[in-house]
Image: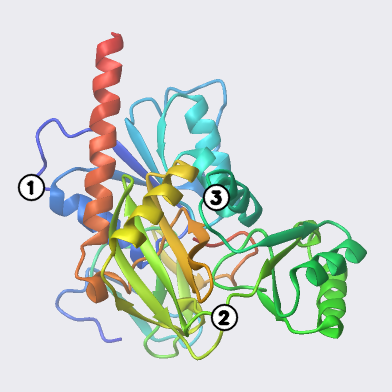
Amino acid sequence: MNNTVPDAPRLALLYTRVRVEERMLLDAFESIGVPIEAIDTRSLAFDTTDPEPWTRFYAVIDRSLSLTCSITATRILEGFGVRCINPARAIEVCSDKLASTIALERAGVPTPRVCVAVDEESALLAVESIGYPAVLKPTIGSWGRLVARVNDRDAAEAIIEHRATLGSAQQGVFYVQEFIDKPGRDLRVFVVGGEPIAAIARRSAHWVTNTARGATAEGIAITEELGDLCRRAASTCHADVVAIDLLECPRRGLLVNELNHSMEFRNSVQTTGVDIPRLVAEHAIRIARACRAEVAACR
Amino acid sequence: MMPTQSTVQSATCPECEGEIAFQRRPLAGEVVVCVGCSAELEVQTVEPLVLALAPEVEEDWGE
């Protein structure tokens, strides 16, 4: 690299697969002139008594596709005193829909009503309590996987039995959410350093509006209401970088639906005109510089 | 894909045996799509450069 910034803070990026987003982030660091070491989390064997290999980094960006890898690595690194982006507690809150719901409700951030059960019979009660149609989701998972709209009791019984019989232990947590009759789209706001930087609307004829399921994205303006709500939502999960999914409820207005700690943005840079990876990189560099200053002050 | 002037490295698609050209130095774990057969591939090793079919989505993968 020829344009390396003098005295650049040392950073690393953890990954399990190099998707387009990881390439875009690495390119952003290169264009800024700050070197960053890309490390495959799967290749690591952490010695919990030996922080030395990691203390040379002032910040580590976790971009592991696997949640298990993310949580494992960030817990260990934070134990070593290494600043992780995002922090482990942010990953824990964002990655688990139940934890997200609890954090949002405690903070008074409007979110769809949720009922949870850990037994098949109770799950049916939870669905009936929410009312039909209801939405049954795995507490952990992305891209709309295994999200089911339950229109009646017959469907509820079938889906609950399938989950209980065929699913993993995690599928034994029945997370039932009220169905929001949204206007053919949901909203996603990208928040970096607590500030909303870009927003898209995801449209689909299907009620699931994930772009991974074929929804199309278009850039939208961040209104004052939307921005304020997303600042509040981001602060509940302590994330440095987070994508917030929102639903427009005809009765209750904007509701925060999900929090995403390892956001994908490949289709949102052009549609919003915002250089999302560069803003993420710049924020990570600011954090790393601040951590370096703290370390220097302690010496 | 036929290697071009900007190709820095190339490998063979394990599915269709077509040529996969890299315009930048590949990273272990990098995901590429074969333009010949649309298979999603993952870089297994960079020295030597070996590609394999990318694994199916796992339960804990996501954003």
Judge the density around disc 2: few (<14), some (14-19), many (≥20) Cα neighbours within 10 Å: some
Q: Residue furthest top?
A: A299
Judge the density around disc 3: few (<14), some (14-19), many (≥20) Cα neighbours within 10 Å: many
Camera sees residue B44: no
Q: Residue at x 21, y 74 (%)?
A: B7
Q: In the drawing, does residue B28 fall left or right of residue A293?
A: right
Q: Which mark is residue A2?
A: 1
Disc 2 marks a residue whose amino acid type is Asp
Helix, strand or loop for disc 1 = loop
Question: Whole-Å distance between the Cαs marked 3 and 2?
Answer: 21 Å
Disc 3 marks a residue whose amino acid type is Leu
Question: Whole-Å distance between the Cαs marked 3 and 1?
Answer: 45 Å
Question: Whole-Å distance between the Cαs marked 2 and 1?
Answer: 53 Å
Q: Which residue is mark 2?
A: A181
Q: Are marks 3 and 1 in contact (CB under 8 Å)?
A: no
Tell if the residue under mark 3 belongs to the same chain as the one under mark 1: yes
Provide residue A15's location: percent of width, then percent of height: 44, 52
Q: Which residue is mark 3?
A: A104
